[in-house]
Image: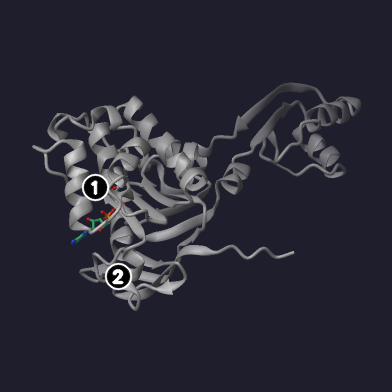
Amino acid sequence: MVILEKLILETKNLTKKYKEEAVVNAVNLKVKEGSIYGFLGPNGAGKTTAIRLILGLTRSDQGEVYIFEKDFHKHRSEILSKIGSLIESPSYYPHLTGGENLEVFRRIWGIADKKRVDEVLEIVKLTQAKNKKAKNYSLGMKQRLGIALALLHQPQFLILDEPTNGLDPSGIHEIRELVKEMPKQFGITVMLSSHLLSEIEQVATDVGIIREGNLIYQDSLKELQKQAKPQIVLSVDQTERAKNVLADTPFEYFADENEIFILNPESHAVGLITKTLVEKEITIHRIEERGGSLEQIFLDMVGSDAS
Ligand SMILES: Nc1ncnc2c1ncn2[C@@H]1O[C@H](COP(=O)(O)OP(=O)(O)OP(=O)(O)O)[C@@H](O)[C@H]1O
């Protein structure tokens, strides 16, 4: 059965060039309704530019953007009225309190529901700090105030560009918990960018990886995790014979001169492999588990400078 998932965002061939060089190169993003889409890439990979193109803040050189299954350029204001975004640092009045800031924007944007200010303060857990001046907020609180502003008009899609940049571990934790709540509690699809896999890994359901303007990976986080399955590495006294023995088994493997690598091993495989080899009088010097790190997969994809 084919389950058709609704796409909240789809870009087709999205391209932006600066001085003839494509910083976003024919990118086809697909963000599914109800997902938390982690947009991952090293600094300078093109994440902010892509997000600015999606929101119509920068003009593309080529390609199309569909949001809520509508052509962005034809339905711009309707679409924007249902999107909340936070790009880089939030804009707020430092001398006003958090509550006053939200109230000012509520009026500017013509949001009739006066209770909405308290609702968004509650969502981002700033109720206690409502009457404190924004300039005295911690960086994490300022960032949450920015998210509260982005949520004020009850968007269906929230785009956050590097929301945890510069935050301490507790600030990062708070943003992460907040983002996780969005789809389930409020029906909001989230796209967030980061250059840190560790951050995306803890919140995202889906991942897009961009490198030098090219989208080099896009799938569910689960699929990416599957790729990070560990390998069992065997070091034996007769590698050639061991290879011949293993060729008659269902296990996938490859070998170099000294070691045999068993790919995607099931939990019972190690026992069976060792038993088979020992029965053929092959001595096993060492068995170890290697790989299995999502970080390694990411670094292999984007290059080690990404760390
Ligand atoms: N207005 C501009 N003029 C010229 N080049 C630009 C402009 N904006 C961005 N770039 C270049 O485009 C590339 C992508 O930048 P972008 O800010 O989108 O990357 P990023 O992935 O968001 O990285 P970061 O996390 O460091 O912001 C970079 O090489 C950057 O120098």
For the N terminus, the quadrant is: bottom right
Query: In the rendered image, is residue 85 in sight?
Result: yes
Outermost right residue: 279
State whether residue 184 is above or below residue 215.
above
The image position of residue 302, as x and y in percent, is 42, 48
Q: Say which quarter of the image contains residue 231.
A: top right
Tell me, for residue 51, which label it has, or none: none
- First in sequence: mark 2 vs mark 1: 2
Query: What is the CA distance from the residue labelled 2 to the residue labelled 1?
Result: 22 Å
Q: Amino acid at mark 1?
A: Glu
The coloring applied to the image is one colour
* Disc 2, SS: helix
Outermost bottom residue: 74
Query: In the rendered image, is residue 90 in sight?
Result: no
The image position of residue 123, as x and y in percent, is 37, 38
Between residues 8 and 59, which one lies in front from this camera angle?
Answer: 8
Between residues 199 and 9, which one lies in front from this camera angle?
Answer: 9
Residue position marked by numbered label 2 in the rendering: 77
The image shows a total of numbered marks equal to: 2
Going by the image, does 282 lie left or right of 212? right
Q: Amino acid at mark 2?
A: Ser
The image position of residue 300, as x and y in percent, is 48, 45
The image position of residue 33, as x and y in percent, is 51, 58
State whether residue 180 is above or below residue 104.
above
Going by the image, does 189 lie left or right of 242? left
Between residues 68 and 97, which one lies in front from this camera angle?
Answer: 97
Q: Quadrant location of ligand 1? A: bottom left
For the C terminus, the quadrant is: top left
Residue position marked by numbered label 1 in the rendering: 88
How packed mark 1 is, by other alpha carbons closer than 10 Å (few <14, some 14-19, many 20 or more), is some
Going by the image, does 157 lie left or right of 115? right
Q: Say which quarter of the image contains residue 81.
A: bottom left
